[in-house]
Amino acid sequence: MSEAKKINNVIFATGRRKTSVARVRIMKGSGKIIVNGRDVNEYFPAGNYVMIIRQPLEAINFKNDQDLLINVRGGGLSGQAGAIRHGIARGFDLLDESNHSALKANKFLTRDPRMVERKKYGQKKARKRFQFSKR
């Protein structure tokens, strides 16, 4: 099943990272990036998250002729930025097939599978154990 589809010249794509899910809509416009109803620079005050989000746009030489409307839920800012990057890459891959090789080469189309490991019973944390005493 594809995680991106096109309906009435609007592209819908889903990106995921850790526990975050980003729903991205790409439509004709002036290059605005809106995240949860706010400008991307307002939503992510630290510049490194905005840089992560713009990576797929720089890889395909984005011409600021599309607006990106993004809803993101779950996780922290880092996971949300990664989910948005994944969703943007999937959307622009569907928009134009010539973008595929640039996005694939930079691994933007691959979902990062790393998640927090669950805590196990009888242990202090996920992997840390209680101190063992032989006597």
Image: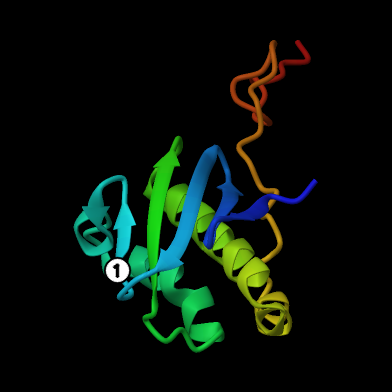
**Residue 129 visible, this angle:** yes
The foreground one among 1 and 83 is: 1
Residue 102 position (above or below residue 17): below
Picture mark count: 1
Q: Amino acid at mark 1?
A: Lys
Q: Which residue is mark 1?
A: 32
Closer to the camera in the image, 99 or 81: 99
Q: Residues within 10 Å of mark 1 (few under 14, many from 20)?
A: some
Give percent across and percent down for residue 77: 37, 49
Q: Quadrant of the C terminus?
A: top right
Task: Return the residue nearer the eye: 33 or 113.
Answer: 33
**Residue 100 in the image: above or below residue 11:** below
In terms of depth relative to the viewer, which is nearer, 119 or 15?
15
Residue 131 horizontal/vertical position (percent): 65, 21
Task: Answer with left or right where residue 123 lies relative to residue 76.
Answer: right
Q: Residue 27, percent across and down?
A: 44, 64
Badge 1 marks a residue whose secondary structure is loop
62 w.r.t. 3: above or below: below
Q: Quadrant of residue 87?
A: bottom right
Which residue is rendered at x = 78% and y = 15% of the image? 134
Residue that appears at 34% across and 71% down: 29
